[in-house]
Image (cartoon, rainbow, N blue to C red):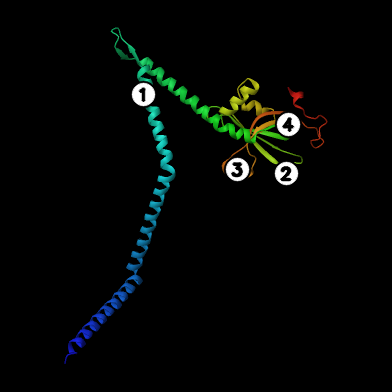
Amino acid sequence: MTEKPHDDANALLDGIDKTLSDFKTKAYEAKKSYDQSELGRAHRDLTMLGRFWSQFVRSCGWIYMQLIAPVTWRIYRFVRWAFAGYRALWARCVYAKDAYGDPEFSKARGGIMILATIAVCYLVYGALTVAATLPWYLATVRHDEQLYLSNSQNLSGSQTEGLEVHEVYGCETLPCTEQNTVTFRVRSTWFNELWSILHHGSLFYPGYVAAAVSPVLNRCVITSYGVRRKFLVRSWELYPDLVQVECMPTGGDGGKDSKTIDNKDYR
């Protein structure tokens, strides 16, 4: 008689366990049925897609904060500093004193200031271009190289459409094959202009440089810079630049002309 409450408690606990077990089983069956349904599959796909985009956006945020933001912030600070300095310079230059000694805005000074700003920006752009090209030139330049050039072509449609660009074709040795051919670009750039002024005392004229290559097989002494890799030419049109050329047409004996090229013979 004294153990009946204990048996009732055990029965109650067993009933609770059975109820929970049945509930879990039914919940599992319901979830399984939902996951196998079209609505469940669509929900699962949308959940995976949302997780992917969430992770992708967070990863892009990390890239921006760690790699891009430090650079852009410094650029932003420099632009603000430069613009503040320009505004101060503008205020000093565009005002003239009137008859009473008070500052008065001058349209002529403002116009001259704008023109001077454009000229300075143009020169700064040229200086940056030269500074960026100089290491490339020093690393890849080839002076007084002897090779064979056979033709040149003007790639610019007209002088009014843009800068004059010529292309010069040749090969490093004879006979010419697909392995030893080389293509140069002759173009007017800031660096080429400065190079010509320092070496020849005149501006760089691409047409005159390309004209030295007659439409026959020529043995030439050239100065060029750039990497001669065909995959760079094909993928990014990264041609070597030709800045100086001295040519003499070869004879009819397969390029073995009787005269040996020496720079002093053509200067």
Nearer mark to the viewer, of 1 and 2: 1
Instruction: Tell me the crowding category of disc 2: few under 14, some 14 to 19, or many 20 or more residues within 10 angstroms, Cα based.
Output: few
The answer to which of marks 1 and 2 sits earlier in the sequence is 1
Which one is in front in this view, the residue at disc 1 or the one at disc 3? 1
Q: Which residue is mark 2?
A: 177
Does residue 185 appear in the picture of this structure? no
Task: Kindly report which numbered mark, 3 or 2, lies closer to the viewer in this rendering.
Answer: 3
When the figure is inspected, residue 257 is found, relative to residue 199, above or below; the finding is: below
Is residue 261 shown above or below 55? above
Per the model, the C-alpha gap separating discs 1 and 3 is: 44 Å
Q: Amino acid at mark 2?
A: Thr
From the top left corner, tell me how far across and down residue 65 is, in percent: 40, 45
Q: How far apart in space, not on screen, are marks 4 and 1 (Cα)? A: 54 Å
Q: Secondary structure at mark 1?
A: helix
Residue visible at 29% across and 11% down in the picture: 102
Residue at disc 2, secondary structure: loop
Q: Which residue is mark 1?
A: 87
Sequence-earlier tag: 3 or 2: 2
Q: CA distance from mark 4 to mark 2?
A: 18 Å
User: Which residue in the structure is indicated by mark 3?
Assistant: 232
The quadrant of the image that shows the N terminus is bottom left
Q: Position of residue 161 (x, y in %)?
A: 53, 30
Q: Is residue 125 something that shows in the picture?
A: yes
Q: CA distance from mark 1 to mark 2?
A: 61 Å
Q: Which residue is mark 4?
A: 220
Residue extending furthest top?
A: 99
- Place residue 79 in its image quadrant: top left
For the residues labelled 4 and 1, say whether their Cβ atoms are less than 8 Å apart: no
Above or below: residue 139 compared with residue 15: above
- Amino acid on which disc 1 is placed: Arg
